Amino acid sequence: MSNLIQRIITGVLFILVIVCSLIWSPVPFIILFLGFTIVALHEFYSMVLNKSSMHLLAGGLIMGAVLYISFALYSIGYIPAKWLFVNFILINLIFLLELLLDGSNAIRNTAYTMLG
């Protein structure tokens, strides 16, 4: 089987999974894209962070997952807007942890964590 046919089959299955999750309910769609978000963030952090700043990997993944989940649950009406304040605390916690844990390259590491 050629590479083009494999890609077409994979694309059709991918679209089918997305459409089925949308038809079923918003929660499976949110879970599906949460998985995509975590995989994409892990790939990004493994490319830009060096070995000395890998402690930011877990913090960045957790921050990305919490941000995604909180906004997704708010958008479908599962949580009130006041719970979005947790995001503000989480973002400030990342700044604080980076400044306390690693003094060298703190700005660069924080930028990679926040922009990921």
Image: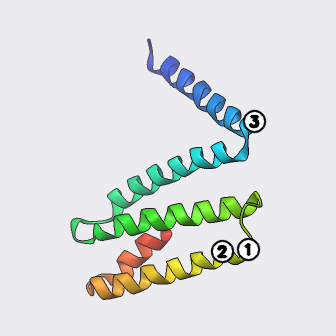
Please identify the quadrant where the N terminus is shown. Answer: top left
The residue at the point 59 percent across, 26 percent down is: 13
Which residue in the structure is indicated by mark 2?
Answer: 84
User: Which comes sooner in the sequence, label 3 or label 1?
Assistant: 3
The residue at the point 66 percent across, 74 percent down is: 83
Give the Cα separation between the discs numbered 2 and 1.
6 Å
Q: Which mark is residue 6?
A: none
The disc labelled 3 sits on which kind of residue? Ile
For the residues bearing labels 3 and 1, Cβ distance under 8 angstroms: no
- The percent coordinates of residue 94 (x first, y second) are 43, 79
Tell which of 109 and 23 is nearer to you. Answer: 23
Image: 98 above or below 33: below
- The percent coordinates of residue 41 (x first, y second) are 45, 57
Alpha-carbon neighbours of circle 2 within 10 Å: few (<14), some, or many (≥20)? some
Which residue in the structure is indicated by mark 3?
Answer: 23
Alpha-carbon neighbours of circle 3 within 10 Å: few (<14), some, or many (≥20)? few
Tell which of 63 and 77 is nearer to you. Answer: 77
For the residues bearing labels 2 and 1, Cβ distance under 8 angstroms: yes
The residue at the point 44 percent across, 49 percent down is: 39
Q: Is residue 31 left or right of residue 102?
A: right
Q: Is residue 89 left or right of residue 74?
A: left
User: Which comes sooner in the sequence, label 2 or label 3?
Assistant: 3
Which residue in the structure is indicated by mark 1?
Answer: 81
Q: Is residue 116 visible?
A: no
The disc labelled 1 sits on which kind of residue? Ala
The disc labelled 2 sits on which kind of residue? Leu
Tell which of 88 and 79 is nearer to you. Answer: 79
The residue at the point 51 percent across, 25 percent down is: 7
Give the Cα separation between the discs numbered 2 and 3.
27 Å
For the residues bearing labels 2 and 3, Cβ distance under 8 angstroms: no
